Amino acid sequence: MRKFLCSLMICAGLASPVWAKCGGSFDSFVNELMRDAQTRGFSEQQAEAFFQGVRSDQAVLKADRRQGVFQLRFTEFARRLISANRIERGRANAAKWDSVFEQIERDYGISRGVLLAFWAFETDYGTFQGDFNTRDALVTLAHDCRRPNLFRPQIFAAMQLFANGDFDPQRTTGAWAGEIGMVQMLPADILENGVDGDGDGRVTLKTSVPDALLSGAKMLQSLGWRAGEPWLQEVTLPDTLDLALTGLPTQLSVMEWQALGVKGRTSTLWQGLTGSVLLPEGKDGPAFFAYPNFRVFFEWNQSFTYVLTAAYFANRLNGAPVFDAGSPRPGLSGDDMKLLQQKLTARGYDVGKIDGILGAGTRAAVRSVQKEMGLPVDAWPTAGLLQRL
């Protein structure tokens, strides 16, 4: 599910060129990778051992193209991913691994709810970590020309893990996009942020809960997590609020939002911080206040719906109540969303790929066209908006 964006291409020589080579004959591509590996300091024997038997995995490409779950509206997506069973198991894991979470909170300033949410969503608390051959997945996605600059460096990071004795090209498995372990980390991030949490001298993210959780915490810290600060809070809005101020682009201080009538639904807003008001389903749906730490979630996944759900689930695991879903106007189906994106593109807006997903580009375009038409600027596309277009 996750669309991971790695943080830093660590280790000298791992960074990809501005335009990574891709496409063409798969065998020729692999031969070129082997030559490139040797220029990066790997021996011919290491390269041959790593790439022996590598194949292009068509199932990986199908998974890469299949992201229909992100077409769901926030409330539906959240209800699908957050069950009573997941909450119960999350709280049980919080108690079971209390000492690990205490260390994370002490050393990294990250609430246990955040790590539990990622652990739950990525692998259902480690029960399903993916059965794709990791090496084959990375080489397949690097050969494919959709995102070669993301995946090519990960091949050489995996080679470094192999050279360190922490990766088996034939047997290491994980998610279709090359992530490994309970919280799903790419090879370069394992090299940079891997932590030996259980003290056995190895970083084993597939079988060691302390290793996985502490490594995930260190990575969040490296991505800019601000220790001890909140990330998301449910709010209520006054009828007088200018909806054009809502959305991630607008950041005001808590004091400024309070002056406009924004209030925490069940607790007061944190003073001294800035943030944005989010309306995932428009003015009649749920409302949230996103603090600076919320943006770190986007370094883990680029889907707004996924990020908001993960951040909200972290709150639920920490004891927050169920959000008020409100009475949002019906959203668009996948096909209607694609039609909307086509019409917005025809008007000169850049919505990115026509994929039926209400992503950041489409939300921004909807806001602009709502303002142009004198409609409430809440970034929530409806059948009425589509008809007017």
Image (cartoon, helix red, strand yellow):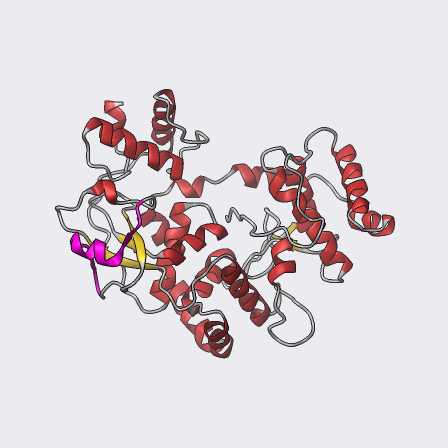
Instruction: Say if residue 208 shows up in the picture.
Output: yes
At 72% from the left and 48% from the top, the residue drawn is 13
Return the residue found at the far right. 45
Picture quadrant of residue 262: bottom left
Where does the image place residue 56, in percent across and percent down from the top left?
70, 39
Let me know if residue 323 appears in the view: no
> Which quarter of the figure is the C terminus placed in?
top left
Q: Is residue 6 left or right of residue 55?
A: left
Q: Residue at x 40, y 33 (%)?
A: 356
Please tell me which residue lies in front, 55 or 370: 370
- The structure residue drawn at horizontal position 59% and vertical position 69%, both measured from the top left corner, is 211
| Identity of the residue drawn at 64% across and 34% down | 19
Location of residue 306 in the rendering, given as x and y in whole percent from the top left corner: 41, 49
Residue in front for this viewpoint, 278 or 329: 278
Image: 366 above or below 283: above
Range of residues picked out in magenta: 250-266
Q: 148 and 74: which one is in front?
A: 148
**Residue 128 placement (x, y as % from top left):** 55, 58
The quarter of the displayed image where residue 146 is located: top right
Spot occupied by residue 104 in the image (x, y as percentages of width and height): 49, 72
| Residue, far top | 346
In the rendered structure, does residue 261 fall within the stretch colored magenta? yes
**In the rendered image, the vertical position of residue 27 relative to residue 175, given as above or below:** above
